[in-house]
Amino acid sequence: QVQLVESGGGLVQARGSLRLSCAASGRTFSDCAMGWFRQAPGKERDFVAAISRSGGSTYYADSVKGRFTISRDNIKNTVYLQMNNLKPADTAFYYCAAVPTSLGIRVVLTMSDYRYWGQGTQVTVSS
């Protein structure tokens, strides 16, 4: 079992920045690949970013590449999503997700592969 608690969402203006945090407890954090997903009202949940167990590998959706950065602190058991140059199209409910992986797995990109999910946090970007 892994419990994920997200924080850092809020209302910002376009071109502004936010940093989302996802604090993990339960299963050893370093055993899990981590990801961020987002879902706008009436839309499907989409992949945003992923990071490997050690943090050595990352992957981003094209829509956020160059603007968002995923990182993790395995001492604090926390994964972050730094969001810069935010756009109104980034408005969505953002979810943190975790999945235990073997050492041979780098990043996990498919939503159905993730086992544990946070409660989500709202990000609203005004124009």
Image: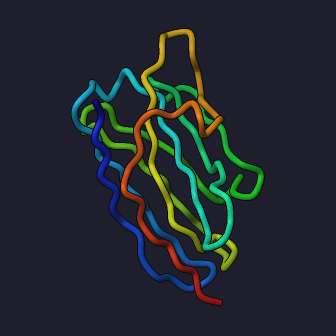
Look at 58% across and 59% down and name the residue there.
38
From what the image shows, is residue 53 above or below residue 95?
Answer: above
Quadrant for residue 63, please give it. bottom right
Look at 23% across and 37% down and name the residue there.
25
Q: Nearer the viewer, residue 36 or 2?
A: 2
Look at 65% across and 90% down and name the residue there.
127
Whether residue 89 sits left or right of residue 103 in the image: it is: right
From what the image shows, is residue 39 above or below residue 15?
Answer: above
Whether residue 87 sits left or right of residue 79 in the image: it is: right
Q: Residue farthest to the front? A: 42
Residue 98 % position (x, y)? 43, 35
Whether residue 114 sits left or right of residue 89 in the image: it is: left
Quadrant in the picture for the N terminus = top left
From what the image shows, is residue 13 above or below residue 77?
Answer: below
Residue 6 % position (x, y)? 34, 56
From what the image shows, is residue 34 above or below residue 127?
Answer: above
Look at 57% across and 16% down and name the residue there.
105
Quadrant for residue 109, please give it. top right
Quadrant for residue 50, please give it. top right
Q: Nearer the viewer, residue 100 or 85?
A: 100
Residue 51 % position (x, y)? 53, 34
Question: What colour scheme was applied to this rendering of the protein?
Answer: rainbow
Residue 111 % position (x, y)? 60, 40
Q: Residue farthest to the bottom? A: 127
Tally of numbered tags:
0
